[in-house]
């Protein structure tokens, strides 16, 4: 695989997960992890979120994509997003386990 093809695949994967190449190199890791979790929550599990959670997650996604607002984000906000993602992962796992157990 040539370098151009690998770069294009990387850019496509980042785009599918709600990120871009430029911000990927300047944002710290916990903020990127929270961005990926927030994007997945909004894309795949928005129906499970209540209005307050939807607003919080969408605000985080807007702020992380804005260069000036990104500087105002704190670790507390990041961990709140990550904890929200963990909460829904646990719920989904319990549902999946109950489905498989009922076979």
Image (cartoon, helix red, strand yellow):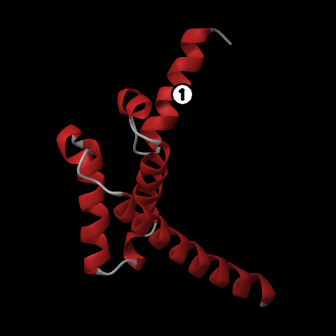
Instruction: Tell me if residue 64 comes above or below residue 43 in the rendering.
Output: above
Instruction: Tell me if residue 91 comes above or below residue 64 in the rendering.
Output: below
Residue 4, position as x, y percentages in the image: 54, 11
Q: Which residue is drawn at 59% across and 19% down?
A: 6
Question: In the rendered image, which quarter is residue 102 located in?
Answer: bottom right
Q: What element carries label 1?
A: helix
**Frontmost residue, 86 versus 96:** 86
**Frontmost residue, 15 versus 21:** 21
Mark 1: few/some/many CA within 10 Å (<14, 14-19, 20+): some
The quarter in which the C terminus is drawn is: bottom right
Furthest residue toward bottom: 102
How many labels, in total?
1
Q: Which residue is drawn at 41% across and 65% down?
A: 81
The quarter in which the N terminus is drawn is: top right
Q: Residue at x 27, y 68 (%)?
A: 56
Residue 97, position as x, y percentages in the image: 73, 82
Residue 67, position as x, y percentages in the image: 22, 38
Instruction: Tell me if residue 33 comes above or below residue 26 in the rendering.
Output: below
Residue 40, position as x, y percentages in the image: 46, 58
Q: Disc 1 marks which residue?
A: 10
Taking the image as shown, residue 89 lies to the left or right of residue 76, namely right
Instruction: Tell me if residue 48 comes above or below residue 1 in the rendering.
Output: below
Q: Residue at x 54, y 71 (%)?
A: 86
């Amino acid at each position: 695989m040539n370098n151009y093809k690998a770069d294009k695949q990387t850019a496509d994967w980042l785009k599918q997960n709600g990120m871009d190449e430029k911000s990927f190199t300047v944002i710290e890791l916990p903020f990127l992890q929270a961005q990926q979790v927030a994007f997945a929550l909004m894309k795949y599990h928005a129906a499970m979120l209540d209005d307050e959670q939807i607003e919080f997650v969408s605000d985080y996604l807007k702020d992380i994509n804005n260069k000036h607002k990104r500087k105002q984000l704190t670790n507390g906000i990041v961990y709140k997003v990550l904890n929200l993602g963990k909460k829904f992962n646990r719920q989904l796992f319990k549902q999946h386990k109950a489905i498989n157990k009922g076979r």
